Image (cartoon, grey):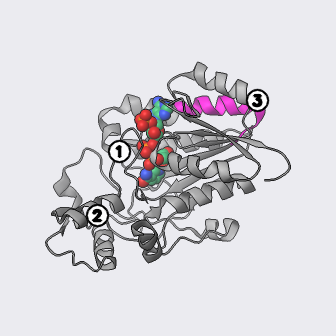
Amino acid sequence: MSGFSERVLLTGSLGFLGSSIAERLPHVSGVRPILTARRGQGDGVLPMNLHSSSEIHRIFREFKPHVLIHTAAFTDVDGAESDKKRSWVENVEAVRILIEACSPIQTFFLHLSTDFVFDGLGNKPYGEKDPTHPINYYGYCKRKSEELLQQQRRFSYAVLRSCHIYGKREGSVLSPRWNIFSLSLKHLREKTICGLVTDTKNNPVWVEDVTTLCLRVIERRLHGIIHVGGERALSPYDFGRSLANYMGQGSEGIFYPISQKTLNRQALRPSQTELSVLRAKDELNYQPTPLEKVFSSLLA
Ligand SMILES: NC(=O)c1ccc[n+]([C@@H]2O[C@H](COP(=O)([O-])OP(=O)(O)OC[C@H]3O[C@@H](n4cnc5c(N)ncnc54)[C@H](OP(=O)(O)O)[C@@H]3O)[C@@H](O)[C@H]2O)c1
């Protein structure tokens, strides 16, 4: 991306993934980042609420972005079950408005989606062309948002479907939430007991790897659905034990195996959603960072 400055508009700049992208974007040559968040903080982050069509259109008219990276979403999987209206507005309706805003200026739209668009009943890693069948409302809304992009023909887009994303930071800046690394580390450090699920499995991916792939997608303008995941499939329990082993600490007395059912959560989780990352490897030279290397970096 050289020669001229591309205006790259980011939504959810204070979220877990969004804040990682926001940190890296200013260092990408030829890019002028336009950072937005629900509650812009006056430190270079503009307020843009996904509920406000007029605010979105105003910002697009003002900045005319060449690229949109859309990470903002209602990501509380159980919350989406109890507040379906909010999930629909923030995960589907917002994408419809953003498509409207991108259309006249043909902004390249990079949308973030999830492995939860699958039902998890398959016995091999899911490819981009496999049929989707979400089993919870969050997955249903994310699939609907993908369809909105696939149905329009006015501009080029990419949908990056990710497995569980982990890293040091605990969720979004304003509403912290555990990920499997931060949760496991807390219990290992504090030596407190924690049940981890054994009957769901995907290939969890380091937030830095997802960020790198987002930057490659927008640089190369890769079109269509792309899967991103880590190097191997693990259950949350496997992940916790791998971290304990890496730290030279036994997990006995800290992690104990539980099934999804015992958690009694509002939303069902698909059991096996490992994503095949062959397309990302072939077309974007993607190499997931090996787990031990990620641990070494996160614990340094
Ligand atoms: N994290 C994962 O494991 C994972 C896995 C697969 C796919 N994804 C996808 O990756 C993307 C990023 O996820 P994440 O983990 O970074 O989520 P996150 O930490 O929850 O960040 C989402 C951001 O969206 C913002 N947002 C929500 N409603 C908004 C609204 N009405 N207006 C403006 N901003 C709003 C939130 O702002 P507030 O903090 O103000 O609410 C939050 O900062 C999402 O599309 C998600 O579906 C994530």
- Residue matched to label 3: 104
The answer to whether the residue bearing label 3 lies less than 8 angstroms from the nearest atom of ligand 1 is no
Between the C-alphas of marks 3 and 2, the distance is 46 Å
> In the rendered image, is residue 3 in sight?
yes
Residue visible at 54% across and 70% down in the picture: 288
Q: Which residue is mark 2?
A: 184
Label drawn at residue 300: none
Using the rendered image of the protein, determine whether residue 158 is visible from the camera's viewpoint: no
Given this view, does label 3 or label 1 mark the residue nearer the observer? 1
Q: Which residues are magenta?
A: 94-108
Q: Secondary structure at mark 2?
A: helix
Dot placed on the residue nearer the N-terminal end, 3 or 2? 3
Q: Quote the CA–CA distance across marks 3 and 1.
A: 36 Å
Look at 63% across and 41% down and name the residue there.
149
Q: As rendered, which of 177 and 296 lies closer to the eye?
A: 296
Q: Is residue 136 left or right of residue 144?
A: left
Residue 176: numbered disc: 1
Q: Looking at the rendering, in which quadrant would you find the C terminus?
A: bottom left
Seen in the picture, residue 126 relative to 154 is either above or below; the reply is below
